[in-house]
Image (cartoon, grey):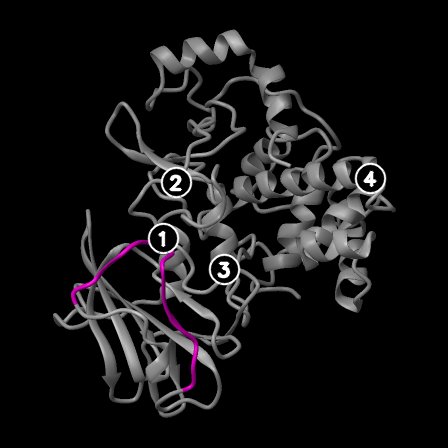
Amino acid sequence: MRNGWFRWVVVGVGVAVVGVLLMVGGGDRTPPDPHCLRDVPRVSRRVAVPGQVAMPLPDNAYTMSSPFGPREGGFHNGVDFAAPEGTAIRAAIEGTVAAAGPASGFGNWIVIDSQRPDGLVSTVYGHMYDSGVGVHTGEHVSVGQTIGAVGSAGESTGAHLHFEVWPGGRLQGGKAIDPLPWLAAVGPSQSESPASNAVVASRSGRRRVQTAGLAIGCDPAPVLGVELRADAVPAEYLPWIHKAATTFCRELTEPILAAQLSQESGFDRWARSPAGAIGPAQFMPGTWAAHGIDADGDGIADPFSIADAVMSQGKFACELIDMAKTGLAEGRLHGDLTQLWLSMYNCGPGATLAQGEVCQNAETLGYVQIIPNLAARFGASSKSAAPPDIRAGGPIR
């Protein structure tokens, strides 16, 4: 899945050029053209390093049932992830158990203190039954390690994990923050795959997410597929949509990317869905942790950054395209390539492969029709089509 788009980047950039650039310009560099986009990290296929984060529950095992912030009865200091009783709870970050056992309101809780470059942070896990607390105070835990099991103890109306993040420390007088942006922005998941993205130090000393398949700075990339009408999207999105569509694979087009952004968020970079998806491309935190890119070179893979979100969307789309192409070639999938990878984007690769075609639920069947239709309106060749209405912000579902 991950090698198909990488071959195109190698062809476009050239193996010899890549080698020279890695030796003399592996860190930050000033683009020769001031109008160029900023440098984008290059290939680094390494096992994720310690110090990163993982979602506290396994992928596809939970739904967000209550967000961070004000709610009836007071302020909610964390997020609730509904999951079946007994679902494994994982340490979101490496650290030392500061508390484990009974706690008012929680039934039981686990507090893990972690020292990071920006200071102490505590992660809190709540509502386990007595039998669901799997660690003890003073124990050192690794990121992704199973520390307990989902329950419904304390002030709870159903099985779920209550999860909090406290910079400054939960027991030291810190302040709770929204865990979802923290999970998405602090780093890639240790638990995704042996070749997940890694955060490494550049020659300048800045930390940046290095991700396979990205071109360098202003190196030329072939313009493939249908171009986007310049007046069809907000100006700040235009250069990144172009770069995403010309970096990862030849099947991805600018209008398709623009149509997805329009459908997912209405080009609202601060969009949040009730299900927990965030940013202009509406990534779930777990998906962002595995696929997020620091495209603008500021040292942080931020799902609310237009550059990071759009480039990550393009990379993820091309991974799905490669999966769909393989499925078609092997006879495991049947149908239109574009509709198949859009189905994977909407209802998941596993569900699409299991059905052998576009997922047959009403939402996905509508999605695979809506996106190409929107794309036709965004394309430069659509002379008579009216521009899509991009004035209304907020998630569009």
Q: In terms of sequence position, does the residue under pointer 1 or pointer 2 come before the other?
A: 2
- The residue to which callout 4 is attached is 328
Question: CA–CA distance between discs 2 and 4?
Answer: 31 Å
Position of residue 266 in the picture relative to residue 327 (left or right): left
Relative to 202, say whether 363 is above or below: below
Regarding residue 20, the answer to whether it shows in the image is yes
Query: Where does the image place residue 20, in percent across and percent down from the top left?
Result: 42, 8
Tell me if label 3 and label 1 are in contact, CB under 8 Å.
no
Secondary structure mostly seen in the magenta stretch = loop
Position of residue 196 in the picture relative to residue 369 (left or right): left
Range drawn in magenta: 138-152
Query: Where does the image place residue 241, in percent across and percent down from the top left?
Result: 59, 38
- The residue to which callout 3 is attached is 278
Question: CA–CA distance between discs 1 and 2?
Answer: 10 Å
- The residue to which callout 2 is attached is 48
Query: Where does the image place residue 213, in percent across and percent down from the top left?
Result: 54, 28
Q: In terms of sequence position, does the residue under pointer 3 or pointer 2 come before the other?
A: 2
Q: Quadrant of residue 355?
A: bottom right
Relative to 382, say whether 131 is above or below: below
Relative to 361, say whether 368 is above or below: above
| Mark toward the viewer: 4 or 3 | 4
Q: Amino acid at mark 1?
A: Val
Residue for point 56% across, 11% down: 14
Q: Amino acid at mark 2?
A: Ala
- The residue to which callout 1 is attached is 53
Residue 71's disc is none
Q: In terms of sequence position, does the residue under pointer 2 or pointer 4 come before the other?
A: 2
Is residue 261 magenta-colored? no
Regarding residue 229, the answer to whether it shows in the image is no
